[in-house]
Image (cartoon, coloured by chain):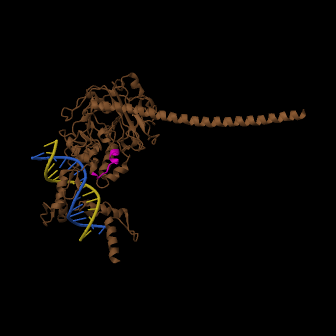
Chain colours: A brown, B blue, C yellow
DNA sequence: CTGGGGAGGGGGCCC
DNA sequence: GGGGCCCCCTCCCCA
């Protein structure tokens, strides 16, 4: 009996152990399966999100293509340019616009809009050309805010978050979150037209197409003409405005779905800031718009606070940031690139540009720097881009530039007969006519349509080519009456004649030495400054000029 | 270092 | 509107 009891106890123990083992195993299996299951669920959710996102994008693309097909001369919008300096704007308003060009999107350059005191209005427009961006390369971002609005609501126009796509196109205080940017983002600029285009106290300007670019390469006939709705273009304007000249105001919407929910999705514009390698997504959807309306609304909207100003026409094809109020700009973004690009001869120009942007208040500012960034400064292949230069009409002149021009005796700004109403969108410089702006903008675009048949050198201007060809022909039409020396350029002769006159207009402020040539004074100043950037690799001796170093090295060589 | 020339970029003006 | 020219400026190079 006792044995029986012991036996039963042992059996019970064994059973218990076995049961525990079985439970543990079952639990383990369940846990494993649960983990796997949970992983699968997570992956499925991710896939669902991805697919949903793709579906949305495809829908948008289809809609956009439908619109494009319905308007033969569709507005090509560019958002290739970022705003100046990533929001290095001071004063009441700060704005910077990120370029969304196919190759110009940086991974850390979002559309950013900043408004310091938030006094009145702010508009950020990104426009991208389908031609430049390729198929699907349309985008438009318009942001506008009126006083008192909550930036987090009125200005957050991104829909990417909802779609699980990306962080928002930055609308932020750059002073506090200067680096908050990047990530691909989809920004819906407008929901329905009715919702988007509301009448307000502000006027707005809508991009319109420029009919002709005049570029030699002619690869980009699309230009956008921004005209402020509600105001007719200047009577002598050479540009025609499409669309209805009715005052409107474009509002950005936070929820992209709102438009479709209303069933009145007349205009949906998306733009994306893409990480490198991510498929460009720049979608613009516009349906049920007449052609005029397409031109009107698909274009970016440019608004400004005053209705009663003159020169209501603004012509852009890139990005326009209209600054109102005191908003000095600093185009520090990609400054390095520009310096590199213009290091040969345009550095001063770049600096001028920068100065202008920094000091030019109450003037339409543009953001071309980024567009320049990714282009080859010398490659002729940049032609497709070249003609994208844009011209801004405005009555606002840059005071610095004007002073400079007046100092040079330039008459373009003197008097009222030749107002510089055509502003270069790259540097804001004003010109009296369109042609001059087009030529000038080659400075920024690098377009060199005139090539020498003998040496393949290229020039931005025909007269420069002609002048250059004297190198090959040996023509020196300018002869010195004193010494019969001949020169190919009149300026060279004039400069040479100082040899005879003894004129030395360039004097050193530190030692009162005088020089006939500015370059000589410049070199001389290095002596005072002790600048010796050129170092001999052989002996470590330093020189202020490269030529000195070269001479030194040649002497070393010959000595050896 | 200095003097000077070659060549190019850019703006303005005239025709 | 385009061509051409003048002018200024700058960089580079060489003697």
| Residue at screen point 50% across, 35% down | A46
- Viewer-proximal residue, A404 or A207? A207
Q: Tell me, yes or no, whether the highlighted magenta stretch contains residue A228.
A: no
Query: In this image, A305 relative to A158: left or right?
Result: left
Q: Does the magenta stretch include residue A370?
A: yes
Placement of A140 over or under A476, stated as above or below: above
Outermost bottom residue? A560
Residue at the spot 23% in from the left edge and 56% down from the top edge: A457
**Camera-side residue of A394 and B9:** B9
Residue positioned most to the top: A262
Residue farthest to the right, as pictured: A1
Residue A544, image x and y in percent?
Answer: 35, 64
Q: Quadrant of residue A428?
A: top left
Q: Residue at left 34%, top 45%?
A: A369
Q: Can residue A129 be seen in this view?
A: no
> What is the magenta range?
A369-379
């Amino acid at each position: 009996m006792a044995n029986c009891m012991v036996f039963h106890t042992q059996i019970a123990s064994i059973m218990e152990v076995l049961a525990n083992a079985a439970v543990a195993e079952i639990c383990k299996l369940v846990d494993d399966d649960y983990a796997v299951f949970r992983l699968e669920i997570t992956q499925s959710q991710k896939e669902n999100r991805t697919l949903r996102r793709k579906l949305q994008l495809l829908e948008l693309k289809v809609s956009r293509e439908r619109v494009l097909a319905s308007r033969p001369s569709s507005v090509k919008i560019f958002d290739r340019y970022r705003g100046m300096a990533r929001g290095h704007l001071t004063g009441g308003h700060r704005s910077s616009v990120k370029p969304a060009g196919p190759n110009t999107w940086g991974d850390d350059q979002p559309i950013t809009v900043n408004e310091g005191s938030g006094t009145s209005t702010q508009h950020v427009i990104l426009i991208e050309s389908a031609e430049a961006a390729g198929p699907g390369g349309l985008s438009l971002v318009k942001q506008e805010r009126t006083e008192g609005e909550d930036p987090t609501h009125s200005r957050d126009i991104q829909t990417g978050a909802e779609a699980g796509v990306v962080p928002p196109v930055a609308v932020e205080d750059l002073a506090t979150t200067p680096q908050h940017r990047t990530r691909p983002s989809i920004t819906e600029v407008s929901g329905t037209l009715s919702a988007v285009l509301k009448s307000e106290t502000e006027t707005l300007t809508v991009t319109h197409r420029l009919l002709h670019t005049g570029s030699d390469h002619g690869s980009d006939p699309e230009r956008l003409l921004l005209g402020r709705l509600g105001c007719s273009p200047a009577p002598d304007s050479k540009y025609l405005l499409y669309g209805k000249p009715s005052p409107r105001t474009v509002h950005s919407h936070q929820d992209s779905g709102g438009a479709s929910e209303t069933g009145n999705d007349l205009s949906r514009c998306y733009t994306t800031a893409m990480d490198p390698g991510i498929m460009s997504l720049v979608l613009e959807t516009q349906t049920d718009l007449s052609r005029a309306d397409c031109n009107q609304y698909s274009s970016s909207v440019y608004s400004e606070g005053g209705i009663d100003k003159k020169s209501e026409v603004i012509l852009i094809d890139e990005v326009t940031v209209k600054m109102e109020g005191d908003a000095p700009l600093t185009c520090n973004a990609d400054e390095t690139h520009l310096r590199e690009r213009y290091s040969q001869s345009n550095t001063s120009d770049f600096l001028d540009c920068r100065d202008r942007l920094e000091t030019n208040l109450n003037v339409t500012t543009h953001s071309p720097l980024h567009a320049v960034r990714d282009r080859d400064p010398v490659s002729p292949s940049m032609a497709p881009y070249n003609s994208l230069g844009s011209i801004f009409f405005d009555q606002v002149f840059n005071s610095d530039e004007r002073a400079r021009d007046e100092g040079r005796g330039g008459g373009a700004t003197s008097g009222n007969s030749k107002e510089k109403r055509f502003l270069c969108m790259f540097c804001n410089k004003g010109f009296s006519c369109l042609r001059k702006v087009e030529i000038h903008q080659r400075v920024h675009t690098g377009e060199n349509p005139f090539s020498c048949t003998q040496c393949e050198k290229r020039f931005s201007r025909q007269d420069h080519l002609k002048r250059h060809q004297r190198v090959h022909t040996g023509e020196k039409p300018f002869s010195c009456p004193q010494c019969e020396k001949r020169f190919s350029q009149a300026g060279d002769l004039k400069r040479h004649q100082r040899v005879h006159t003894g004129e030395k207009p360039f004097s050193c402020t530190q030692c009162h030495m005088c020089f006939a040539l500015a370059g000589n004074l410049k070199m001389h100043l290095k002596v005072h400054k002790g600048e010796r950037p050129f170092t001999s690799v052989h002996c470590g001796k330093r020189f202020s000029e490269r030529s000195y170093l070269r001479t030194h090295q040649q002497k070393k060589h010959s000595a050896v």
